[in-house]
Image (spheres, rainbow, N blue to C red):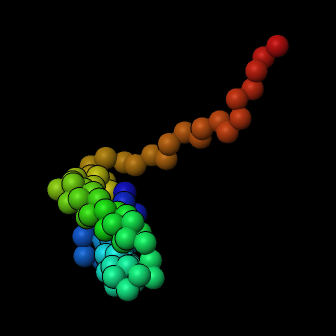
Amino acid sequence: MAALTHAFDPEDGVLGKFTALAVTASRFAQDQATRGLLPAEVWLALGRAANELHDIGLDLEEHLDALAAARVPSATTAVKPPPPAPLVVRRHR
């Protein structure tokens, strides 16, 4: 769970940084589109992607406390490793 918490952290998380990259790319594409060097559709697509990523980040932000709490095991419960899962399913003939 620590990886999820880190990935979705609004300030330092991977999703936040990728959103910032999409915003920057959208602004760059806007400049290039106004000069006629890129089709306007590229700028619009990057803008929509940046908006969607931002909305996803807002949706996940309200659940960060639950993710952080899930990664800290209770002191009263012993943590046992999960049983190994079979990697190959064998058929009996």
Residue drawn at x 24%, y 70% is 10
**Extreme residue toward the right, this view:** 93
Front residue (pair 26, 2):
26
Total numbered badges shown on the rendered structure = 0
Residue 14 drawn at (x, y percent):
38, 71
Front residue (pair 54, 69):
54
Residue 51 drawn at (x, y percent):
26, 63
Residue drawn at x 71%, y 35% is 88
**Extreme residue toward the top, this view:** 93
Location of residue 40 by image quarter: bottom left
Q: Is residue 68 visible?
A: no
Is residue 80 shown above or below 92? below
Is residue 86 shown above or below 92? below
Residue 84 drawn at (x, y percent):
59, 40
Is residue 63 shown above or below 80? below
Front residue (pair 36, 19):
36
* Quadrant housing the N terminus: bottom left
Residue drawn at x 23%, y 59% is 55
Residue 17 drawn at (x, y percent):
34, 75
* Quadrant housing the C terminus: top right
Q: Is residue 49 visible?
A: yes
54 relative position to 28: left or right:
left
